[in-house]
Image: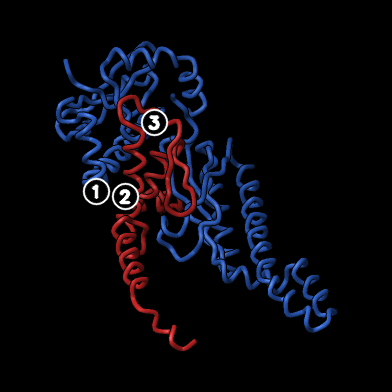
């Protein structure tokens, strides 16, 4: 058989007794199915290797945005459905295996790690928190009340007028520096507080405005693994921070639960 | 509806999905350049995914300014043109 295998996720075989939801695969034709290998079961679909050759896929991805968008959503929705029913190790977008044998081999090699991961994920959920801020508003606060800035202002006012001019020019740079420090302090503090209700918390790269398309700046991007029983509290805390700090320029945005892409690794 | 349900039912943007489905391998440098490292891709060329995310991000931005080759070419043409024009300020010296 010349078909490729598109791998969506891996689940413990003992949970595989629960039937798979009926979902069409990556090509919109073949159904997804289970492929067991001892204690681990892979959720896959067939893909015709001629229709989905490396060239075809790369051509589609580069030239057909709607196709890419549709497939990224398809991948997400499928994995999301799996994660609702099973303890799932989700796979990255477009993970393809040449045949069943190569997939089985990879699973076998990672068996121990996979079982540990299933144990870690069982009963826990992955949530994402992004913190946005209005730089101008926070800059204003820094400029008015930051102790370093205050001290610098006093220092400058004692200087002869000629030198004051040049020192004031440097002031803006100093304020920007203090602004970044202030933002980090604030977000780190929130992060630590939220970590106390989580199993793990980790910090991800923030995205530029060009990527987010928002006028506020993304100050923090983080991901948490939470025991399901702590989720309400976590969300309650975030809601409270949002209420407390919105007026001074901060916005909190939570999304989840996500299939645990961050807290599982299969490679 | 609980807070949880409200959040769960919210629509998710493609950018958020890419943030997670490509995450471990995706690093955003600056504003637009996205690079990928250590992604488990047995079949697909890594470069394919890199270009896809870049193009996608630009595509999503629609009318906003993006760095692309057409814009770059236009800018270069404009500069070339300007550079070949007689300097209208020179006679003032």
Name the residue located 32 percent from the left edge and 31 percent from the top edge. Answer: B45
Name the residue located 34 percent from the left edge and 63 percent from the top edge. Answer: B76
Q: Is residue A261 above or below residue A40?
A: below
**Few, some or many residues within 10 Å of mark 3 (<14, 14–19, 20+):** many
Q: Badge 2 sits on which subunit?
A: B
Residue at which label 1 appears: A65
Q: Is residue A259 above or below residue B85?
A: above
* Residue A14 percent across, percent down from the top left: 38, 17
Q: Badge 1 sits on which subunit?
A: A
* Residue B2 percent across, percent down from the top left: 44, 52
- Of circles 3 and 1, the one toward us is 1
In the structure shown, which secondary structural element does the residue marked by tag 1 occupy? helix
**Letter of the chain shown red in the rendering:** B
In the structure shown, which secondary structural element does the residue marked by tag 2 occupy? helix
Disc sitting over residue A90 in the figure? 3
In this picture, residue A192 sits left or right of residue A120: right
* Residue A48 percent across, percent down from the top left: 16, 26
Name the residue located 63 percent from the left edge and 73 percent from the top edge. Answer: A140
Say whether mark 1 and mark 2 are on the same chain. no
């Amino acid at each position: 058989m010349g078909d490729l295998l598109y791998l969506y996720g891996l689940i413990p075989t003992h949970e595989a007794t629960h039937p798979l939801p009926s979902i069409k695969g990556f090509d919109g034709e073949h159904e997804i199915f289970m492929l067991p290998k001892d204690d681990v079961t892979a959720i896959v679909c067939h893909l015709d290797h001629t229709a989905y050759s490396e060239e075809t896929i790369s051509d589609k991805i580069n030239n057909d945005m709607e196709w890419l968008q549709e497939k990224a959503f398809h991948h997400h929705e499928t994995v999301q459905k799996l994660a609702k029913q099973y303890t799932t190790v989700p796979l990255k977008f477009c993970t393809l295996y040449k045949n069943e044998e190569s997939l089985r081999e990879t699973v076998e090699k990672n068996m121990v790690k996979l079982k540990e991961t299933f144990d870690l994920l069982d009963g826990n959920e992955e949530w994402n928190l992004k913190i946005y801020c209005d730089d101008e508003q926070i800059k204003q606060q820094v400029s008015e009340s930051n102790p370093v800035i205050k001290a610098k202002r006093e220092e400058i006012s004692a200087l002869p007028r000629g030198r004051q001019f040049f020192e004031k020019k440097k002031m803006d740079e100093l304020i920007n520096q203090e602004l970044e420090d202030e933002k980090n302090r604030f977000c780190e503090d929130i992060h630590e507080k939220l970590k106390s209700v989580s199993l793990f918390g980790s910090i991800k790269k923030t995205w530029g405005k060009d990527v987010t398309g928002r006028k506020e700046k993304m100050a923090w991007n983080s991901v948490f693994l939470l025991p399901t029983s702590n989720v309400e509290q976590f969300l309650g805390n975030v809601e409270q921070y949002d209420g407390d700090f919105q007026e001074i320029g901060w916005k909190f945005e939570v999304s989840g639960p996500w299939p645990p892409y961050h807290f599982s690794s299969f490679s | 509806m609980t807070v949880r349900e409200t959040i769960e039912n919210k629509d998710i943007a493609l950018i958020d999905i890419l943030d997670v489905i490509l995450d471990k391998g995706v690093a955003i440098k600056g504003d637009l350049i996205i690079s990928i490292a250590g992604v488990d891709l047995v079949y697909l060329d890594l470069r394919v995914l890199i270009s896809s995310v870049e193009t996608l991000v630009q595509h999503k931005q629609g009318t906003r300014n993006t760095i692309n080759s057409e814009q770059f070419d236009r800018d270069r043409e404009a500069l070339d043109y300007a550079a070949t024009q007689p300097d209208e300020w020179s006679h003032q010296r």
